Amino acid sequence: MKILYLTILFAVSLFPSGQVFAHTPLCSCYDNGDGTITCEGGFSDGSSAAGMKISVQDKDGNLLIRGKMSEDSEFTVDKPAGCYKVIFDAGPGHRIEVDGKEIFE
């Protein structure tokens, strides 16, 4: 019984909280200079963003483009005219908005 208790105590000390397994979403977008923009996504723990939802909305929040990150965790689309934002949505608490004003070559 003492060995079981020590084993559990040791395991708990290695993983003190669920935060050990947490990862933060990352998304970076740039203008390709040819009328398209590319966004690259991922997570702070090195996880891929392949298949994660991504969309583009106009300034009023209207959906312009909807898609998913490619196998390479990239998303390339025609650059919208006017004001827009890109939304990388990897689930609750994992959403990033990139304002079109911040996307440049």
Image: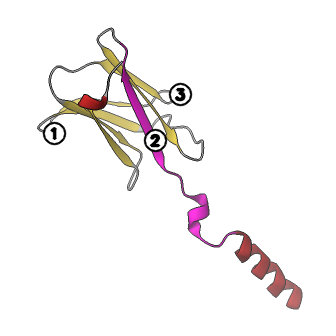
Specify the amino acid type for callout 3: Glu
- Which corner quadrant of the image does residue 46 belong to? top right
Rendered location of residue 36, percent (x, y) = 32, 15
Q: State how far apart marks 3 and 2 are (Cα).
A: 16 Å
Q: Is residue 28 above or below residue 90?
A: above
Where is residue 102 drawn, in percent x and y?
A: 29, 31
Instruction: Name the residue carrying label 1.
Output: 61
Q: Is residue 6 left or right of residue 104?
A: right
* Label number found at residue 97: none
Q: Is residue 87 magenta?
A: no
Does label 1 or label 3 sit earlier along the sequence? 1
Which disc is residue 26 wearing? 2
As measured in the structure, the alpha-carbon distance from the residue carrying label 1 to the one carrying label 3 is 27 Å
Q: Amino acid at mark 2?
A: Leu
Q: Earlier in the sequence, mark 1 or mark 2?
A: 2
Give x and y (percent) for residue 16: 64, 73
Say which element carries label 2: strand
Is disc 3 placed on a helix, strand or loop? loop
Q: Is residue 9 left or right of residue 80?
A: right
Quadrant into which the C terminus falls: top left
The residue carrying mark 3 is 71
Tag 2 or tag 3, which sits nearer the N-term? 2
Circles 3 and 2: CB atoms closer than 8 Å: no
Q: Residue at x 33, y 8 (%)?
A: 34
Q: Which residues are magenta?
A: 15-32
* Way the structure is coloured: secondary structure
* Dot 1 and dot 2 residues touching (CB under 8 Å): no
